[in-house]
Amino acid sequence: MAKPLVAIVGRPNVGKSMLFNKLVGQRLSIVEDTPGVTRDRLYAEAEWCGHTFDIVDTGGIEPGTDSEILTFMRRQAEIAIQNATVIVFLCDIKTGLTASDQEVANMLLRSRKPVVLAVNKADQVGPTNPDIYEFYNLGLGDPIPVSAVHGHGTGDLLDACVQHFPENGEEDELDDVVKVAVIGKPNVGKSSLINRILGEERVIVSNVAGTTRDAVDSYFENETGKYLFIDTAGMRKKSKVDDRIEKFSVLRATMAIERADVCLILIDANEGVTEQDTKVAGLAHEAGKASILVVNKWDAIEKDDKTMDRMREDIRRDLSYMTYAPIVFISAMTGQRVPRLFELINYVNDQAAMRITTGMLNSVLADATARVQPPSDKGRRLKIFYMTQVGIKPPHFVCFCNDAQLFHFSYQRYIENQIRNTFGLEGTPIRLTIRQKGDKEG
């Protein structure tokens, strides 16, 4: 089940980024920053009161603006709103309630999402500033005074957010639906592939409110299962695009990947693996998502009996960190091999959810250490006591040893390969955590 998402929105200069940094940097224990995001950290994973969730900082919403940059910021915020579990609407007590605040509030009310109203720059402690009462006029419930500078009120704010998170099991009806993010650079055929799937093989199709007008979630069901396809914007070369647009498209792709069970990474057969492809694939890999490398436009290639093998070798070389991902050659235009995608999606999704008993893991571990002796340094040899699985999607294993410093990366890779050789785990990355004796397991 996807983690809840808290989106911080509001008009420009009310302190959204400062609040985001305060929540992420001091008030919360960060699990990890989502990779592939911008340098100013628009997106972070966090924990509060036992709930793990994502926080996203958005550009300021300036209603009715003609400025191109502000329009992009607004669109970015709209994507966050549509994906959010709960929205934190931030206002500024020093400037008071503005017409722009009212317009943003109306937009949030139309979204029908839970909204927590926070009023920033309430920096004094003590009696409540009477200026806060005018924010009741927004019709969004009780305003929570906060200080992004000092951190006052942020605990109350997060408590209010957590109340809107779904209970465990609340989304059980979606558990049998595989969420598939279709990602790749622009013009690689993402929408064409989804249209091919929805247009010719559909049993049940309905549009679920998605990210933007050009990235809609599409539900699809056939004899192989139930799927939710998430179409995403492509990421362009930096030289061809304004930095803000790049942030906006990376944010959208990151959100799609975060929500997905499986990522279809589309590659243009005419171009092979490009720099953007490695960036897109890296997002899915770092997020730990089951992935399939889909070479599209295969019908446009002049082929001999070695063409496919050569292309496969090139992909394996250029995406060397994703050797686990199966490669399939399709044509969204003609429909060639498109039906095979469903079997692969189900297969890699099941592989990513595989659980392996501790007994079986340690049998593999004993065999692996007998074949290749663990490394040593200055007379001290690595001893691996045992290994256990602690998570799925991706499969996450913890190795307990006498000295983590001795557990070299190359030996970790060897252990990972032995696990794959025995259990498969095709299509999914593996997480391997090393702990030495005396470390806490939590």
Image (spheres, rainbow, N blue to C red):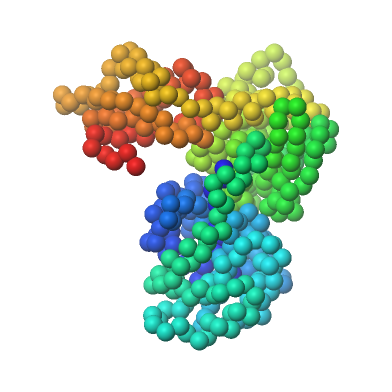
Q: Nearer the viewer, residue 241 or 45?
A: 45
Indicate the position of residue 136 as horizontal and vertical percent values.
60, 79
198 over 339 or under it: above or below: below
Residue found farthest to the bottom? 130
Residue 36 shown left or right of residue 206 in the figure: left
Q: Residue at x 17, y 26 (%)?
A: 380
Q: Quadrant of the N terminus?
A: top right
Residue 100 image position (x, y, % from top left): 65, 77
Quadrant location of residue 153?
bottom left
* Quadrant position of residue 56: bottom right
Residue drawn at x 35%, y 27% as measured from the top left: 387
Left or right: residue 312 compared with residue 361:
right
Which residue does the image show at 28% across and 17% down from the upper left?
Answer: 373
Residue 138 visible somewhere in the drawing: yes
Relative side of 273 to 417, left or right: right
Image coordinates of residue 117 in percent, x first then y, are: 56, 71
Q: Considering the image in quadrants, where does the C terminus appear?
A: top left
In the figure, 337 relative to 158: above or below? above
Q: Is residue 372 visible?
A: no
Looking at the picture, how far across and down is residue 374, in whole percent?
28, 21
Residue with the most extreme right position: 200
Q: In the visual, does 200 lie left or right of 424?
A: right
Using the image, determine if residue 433 lies above or below residue 107: above
Residue 326, above or below 168: above
Residue located at (41% from left, 30% from top): 389
Label count reads 0
